[in-house]
Amino acid sequence: DIQMTQSPSSVSASVGDRVTITCRASQGISSWLAWYQQKPGRAPKLLIYTASSLQSGVPSRFSGSGSGTDFTLTISSLQPEDFATYYCQQANSFPYTFGQGTKLEIK
Amino acid sequence: QLQLQESGPGLVKPSETLSLTCSVSGGSISSTNYYWGWIRRPPGKGLEWIGNIYYSGTTYYNPSLKSRVTISVDTSKNQFSLRLSSVTAADTAVYYCARLGAPRKFEYWGQGTLVTVSS
């Protein structure tokens, strides 16, 4: 199985801050990476697919980059509604696997 | 707008079989463009992919669960289902159904249903 490792596990930030979350795959996955946002009691929401494609309806302050084994999710200017947990997920090969999550908290 | 809704018992006894159904509305489960999947999140843990199914019945399972999992599809009811046998407390989780669209993205999710394994 491909292991996905996110860092940091948690981060505190303020409204307006720029935040970057990193995801590393245990082997190359080309650009087959997605990012999801999950709020308590809610289903995950797709933000980014194929590493850098913005899902329809997602604000442009979210962006993704990377290929191979190293990927990043960047939120350019945090808004109050962005405080949530973020997961990366590889779709290069079965079994699909997720990172352990990064909890983004209000400072 | 596509909607997915999980249904099934919220409490299952150890060693028994967990059964959930995902009802799809606002679109056809028989579309050739999509797979349909199950993902779970145990309390305090991250997301785990369980498996996917195509409308024709082709399935892909997580090897860690493969011996206990069956995913099936009922195109006449626009539903797909999950069965997980011989459950233990480790199978307690919120279970989500989702649509896997091109290119390989879980773009629509159900709201999730909590299944607790306990006697």
Image (cartoon, rainbow, N blue to C red):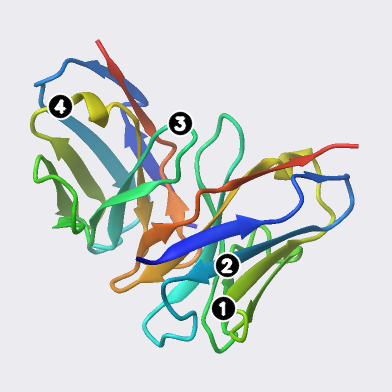
Q: Earlier in the sequence, mark 1 or mark 2?
A: 2
Which amino acid type corresponds to the residue marked 1 in the rendered image? Answer: Asn
Q: CA distance from mark 3 to mark 4?
A: 18 Å
Q: Badge 2 is on which residue? A: B23
Which amino acid type corresponds to the residue marked 4 in the rendered image? Answer: Leu
Return the mark for residue A40.
3
Q: Is circle 3 on the same chain as circle 1?
A: no
Q: For numbered disc 4, what is the local secondary structure?
A: loop
Q: Is circle 2 on the same chain as circle 3?
A: no
**Residue A29, located in which quarter of the rendered image?**
bottom left
**Residue A84, located in which quarter of the rendered image?**
top left
Q: Badge 1 is on which residue? A: B78
Q: For numbered disc 3, what is the local secondary structure?
A: loop
Crowdedness near tag 4: few (<14), some (14–19) or many (≥20) residues, C-alpha within 10 Å: some
In the rendered image, the quadrant that contains the C terminus of chain B is top right
Q: Residue at x 74, y 64 (%)?
A: B83
Label 1 close to label 2 by CB (< 8 Å)? yes
Q: Is residue A44 left or right of residue A35?
A: right
Q: CA distance from mark 1 to mark 2?
A: 6 Å
Q: CA distance from mark 4 to mark 2?
A: 35 Å
When the figure is inspected, residue B54 is found, relative to residue A46, above or below; the finding is below
Which amino acid type corresponds to the residue marked 2 in the rendered image? Answer: Ser
Place of residue A104 in the rendered image (x, y in percent of width and height, measured from the top left): 30, 25
Q: Badge 4 is on which residue? A: A78
Q: Is circle 3 on the same chain as circle 4?
A: yes
